[in-house]
Image (cartoon, rainbow, N blue to C red):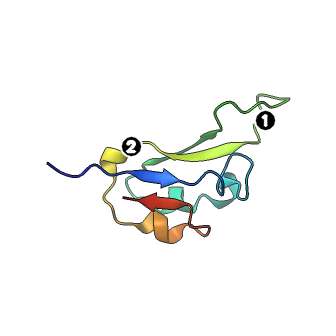
């Protein structure tokens, strides 16, 4: 049986109003050929205007499509992505 891929995004660095706004970076989304990452509003974020969300996160959603090429890890300028 093949090992299941696990991808962790360190949200203390990337997204959720922390160090990096993923809308400004998007390097992992751009480099990932199978497009496993999703850019979304941070769950539980409370904004004055719900149509202008300010807190965003990147989540690795479609793990079964990951080829383990590690391009996302190499592309992340903050080292926020770990594939295991």
Nearest to the observer: residue 27 or residue 42: 42
Question: Which residue in the rendered view is the most extreme toward the right?
Answer: 48
Q: CA distance from mark 2 to mark 1?
A: 26 Å
Name which residue lies at 52% across and 45% down.
59
Circle 1 Cα neighbour tier, 10 Å, few/some/many (<14 / 14–19 / ≥20) = few
Nearest to the observer: residue 66 or residue 51: 66
> Does residue 17 lie above or below 43 as drawn?
below
Secondary structure of residue under mark 2: loop
Circle 2 Cα neighbour tier, 10 Å, few/some/many (<14 / 14–19 / ≥20) = few
Where's residue 29, x and y in %?
Answer: 52, 55
Nearest to the observer: residue 33 or residue 46: 46
Callouts 2 and 1 close, C-beta under 8 Å: no
Where's residue 69, x and y in %?
Answer: 34, 66
Q: Which residue is mark 1?
A: 52
Q: Could you say which quadrant of the image residue 56 lies in?
A: top right
Q: Could you say which quadrant of the image residue 19 lies in?
A: bottom right
Name which residue lies at 62% across and 51% down.
11
Q: Which residue is mark 2?
A: 62
Where's residue 40, x and y in %?
Answer: 60, 40
Q: Nearer the viewer, mark 2 or mark 1?
A: 2
Question: Which residue in the rendered view is the most extreme toward the left?
Answer: 1
Mark 2 or 1, nearer chain start: 1
Where's residue 10, x and y in %?
Answer: 57, 54
Name which residue lies at 66% across and 57% down.
13
- What is the number of callouts on the image? 2
Secondary structure of residue under mark 1: loop
Please indicate whether residue 2 sits to the left or right of residue 45 in the image: left
Please indicate whether residue 37 sits to the left or right of residue 68 in the image: right
Nearest to the observer: residue 9 or residue 36: 9
């Amino acid at each position: 049986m093949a090992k299941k891929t696990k991808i962790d995004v360190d949200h203390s660095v990337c997204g959720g109003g922390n160090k990096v706004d993923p809308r400004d970076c998007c390097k992992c989304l751009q480099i990932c050929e199978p497009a496993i990452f999703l850019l979304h509003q941070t769950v539980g974020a409370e904004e004055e205007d719900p149509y202008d969300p300010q807190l965003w996160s990147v989540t690795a959603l479609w793990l079964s499509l990951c080829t383990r090429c590690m391009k996302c890890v190499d592309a992340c300028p903050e080292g926020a992505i770990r594939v295991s």
